[in-house]
Image (tube, coloured by chain):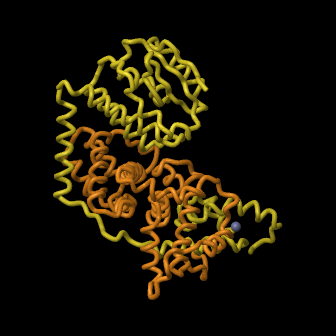
Chain colours: A yellow, B orange
Amino acid sequence: MTENKPSNTIATEHTELEGLIPWYVNGTLSTEESAAVKQHIAVCEQCQSEALRCQSLVGQLPAAQEIWKPSAAHFTGILANVDKLEAATAKPDTSRTKTTLGLFQRICACLSQTPSPVRWTLAFETLAFAALALFLVLPNSPIPKTGGVFETLSNAESSTTKGKSIRLVFSEDMTTRELFDLLKQAKAQIRQGPSEVGSYTIEVASKDEAQSLSVLRANPKVRLAQAVE
Amino acid sequence: MAKTVDDALGIALLKRIAAKDRKAFEEFYYLYAEGFGRFLMKMLKQQDWVDEAVNDVMLTIWQSAERYDPERGRLSTWLFGIAHNKGLKILERNGRHREQSLEDYAGEVDNDGDDAPEHYHAAISASSEPERMVMGWELGDAMTWAFSRLSADHLAVIDLCFGEDYSYQEIADIVGCPINTVKTRLFHARKHLAELLARKGFSLPEQGKVMI
Ligand SMILES: [Zn+2]
């Protein structure tokens, strides 16, 4: 409105800016982005309609049908579950290996389903959860060589990830905790394993491949770390 | 939620929770659970599921309080991320998520570009509607109905953007996908919403003036 831009400049701007309109409307764009969108909207009818539709959406957003409220009863239930958790982590009974492996498996399965740019929120909680479980419950026991412990990880989801696979074989005295630490250092996730011969397939982001391989190979308990196609 | 609550208070509580302080845990619950509970209620639509999801979020907080890093974003973003994850698990376990999402995923793969807003209305008029137009409905009724038909993914981005006022970066952190996917997903979510509204004979008004 304030200036006459050539239409191809407007078209370029349009491609860049139309995707930002919802956040222009909710007011969370940076000052620069916001200024750019504002200026573009003034000369682009299409984006102006977009902005108006977004604005009317804000006003029409239905509230949740029912409202959820915290309650003393609900919190008591949570505390009971906290007690169960604490008891489970403190109990030195024979079922602990099984429980912890199940937990580890679930965590890995969960990580394996994560889209490639790792969700920090998810990674946070699962890593912390794993750290707690593994460090407190299973500090240094060797990993059982039972086949198929991590088999559920090799599901369809892995085909959609864009990472690099690495075959990993480590010495028999590698503990769960050490494995976990190593995978964390190497920014790797377990995809599959252990196989009959005790090898794991792990996955790292493409950009981290070289770094991960050198971290893995530098570990004295790693017998083989090899990129696979 | 935490927009009205000072993060510093939550962070102080998290420190005490990390030291297994149950009083702090309780305070945290009353301070924050309503916020992510509201988000979960829209996502899950059932009280008992929200009870369970909030329980799961709180247990994660109990176990991982020390993992929150203020450098990486607002506390509410971290909490909503955990809540979103727990909510999805409950939907998945109940067979809802996949089923509902299938129809919506079809168009979501492409990255902006082709599917520009001018196709918006073409798509609407082309859609064959199984439902009949309901006479006497207000836009609000149609909106409530349409929201009940959106997939969890679409509902989440619309709610996080227009209901909770999160930035695209924060939404990407919460739902765990790249920024471009958030933008594309929101575009498709709004398109689907517009299609649903059109089935009931409504559209979002475009008249008026951009207020910002
Ligand atoms: Zn434009």
Q: Quadrant of ligand 1?
A: bottom right
Residue B75 shows up from this direction: no
- Identified at 38% across, 71% down, the residue is A63
Q: Position of residue B98 (x, y in %)?
A: 45, 53
Which of the two residues, A152 or B26, is positioned nearer the viewer here? A152
Classify the position of the C terminus of chain B by image quarter.
bottom right
Residue sticking out furthest to the right = A6
- Identified at 36% across, 12% down, the residue is A173
In the displayed structure, does residue B33 sit left or right of residue B99?
Answer: left
Q: Position of residue B81 (x, y in %)?
A: 41, 50
Q: Position of residue B94 (x, y in %)?
A: 35, 53
In the displayed structure, does residue A23 sit left or right of residue B1?
Answer: right
Residue A35 shows up from this direction: yes
From this view, report whether residue A122 is shown above or below residue B203. Answer: above
Which of the two residues, A167 or A141, is positioned nearer the viewer here? A167
Residue sticking out furthest to the front = B130
- Identified at 42% across, 22% down, the residue is A194
Q: Position of residue B156 (x, y in %)?
A: 45, 59
Classify the position of the N terminus of chain B by image quarter.
bottom left
- Identified at 37% across, 58% down, the residue is B2
